[in-house]
Amino acid sequence: MHTIDEAAAAGRKIPRHIAIILDGNGRWAKKRGLPRALGHKAGCEALERTVEDCARLGVEFLTVYAFSTENWKRSQEEVSALMQLFAFYIPRLRKRAMANDIRVTAIGDESRFAPELARMLDELVRDTAENKGMTLVMALNYGARDELRRAAVRLAAQVQRGELLPEEITEETIAQALDTAGIPDPDLLIRTSGEQRLSNFLLWQSAYTEFLFPEVLWPDFTAETLTACIEAYQKRDRRFGGRKEAGS
């Protein structure tokens, strides 16, 4: 098994954009007889490690599914604990982002967050905007169907104002109306815990993404797990709907 630094030094093709569904915090805690909140705390610590590992490896974009539009359906106790964790980790994330030249941005609808938390997120994005290294995309109160709905509203408003004709709406026009405008589609999407579904994450953007579903629970995700996922990705034959020529 290669380490992160060895993989980078080897010069092998690294995915430009990795997306991760951070799954398994609750099960990790349950296995240890701990409250779910401690599972989420361990998940935040795994995220901190993984952000630095990806930046060191040369990944250009890392998108993490941190809180979905459906997560509001969880118990009030768990949602409150998650909001408190976000508030606690945002300053830590800012420190790590500045130390590693990481730009942080967010996708999703932050209007449902408490004003103080929304302010902290906005400041994190603003303070790291000039960093030149990896871009960390935080999917917060994000759902792909909601993203597509909001994109449709934006395009409809442009049509209504006479700025756009219906027949001028192309795939590129739609892509530019999404939260991820300007961000390349993921090359590799990882969902931990072995679950094999997208759960309303990056539905448009993942049309030609490679998927991996390691059994490891998110808090146990390590540099070695990341390296194994990248090595598996490197063995894939990405044809984007085409096929190789005979004999190639």
Image (cartoon, helix red, strand yellow):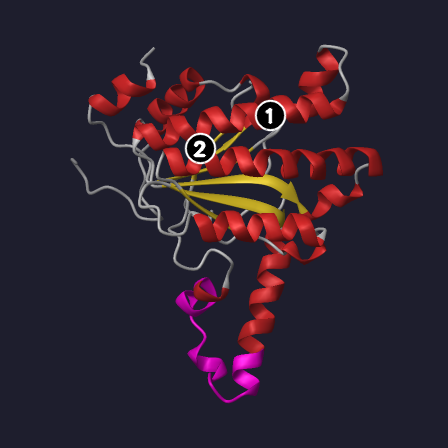
Residue 188 visible, this angle: no
- Quadrant where the N terminus sits is top left
Pinpoint residue 76: horizontal percent, then vertical percent. 83, 38
Q: Is residue 126 left or right of residue 61?
A: right
For residue 114, which numbered disc appears in the image? none
Above or below — where is 248 with respect to 177? above
Judging by the rendered image, the residue that carries numbered circle 1 is: 43
Amino acid under label 1? Gly
* Mark 2–mark 1 distance (CA, rounded to whole Å): 16 Å
Please state which of residues 101 and 46 is positioned toward the viewer in this rendering: 101
Pinpoint residue 160: horizontal percent, then vertical percent. 57, 86
- State which tag comes first along the sequence, 2 or 1: 1
Please state which of residues 223 and 82 is positioned toward the viewer in this rendering: 82
Badge nearest the viewer, 2 or 1: 2
Magenta stretch: give its range: 157-175
For residue 96, which numbered disc appears in the image? 2
Q: Residue at x 66, y 27 (%)?
A: 40
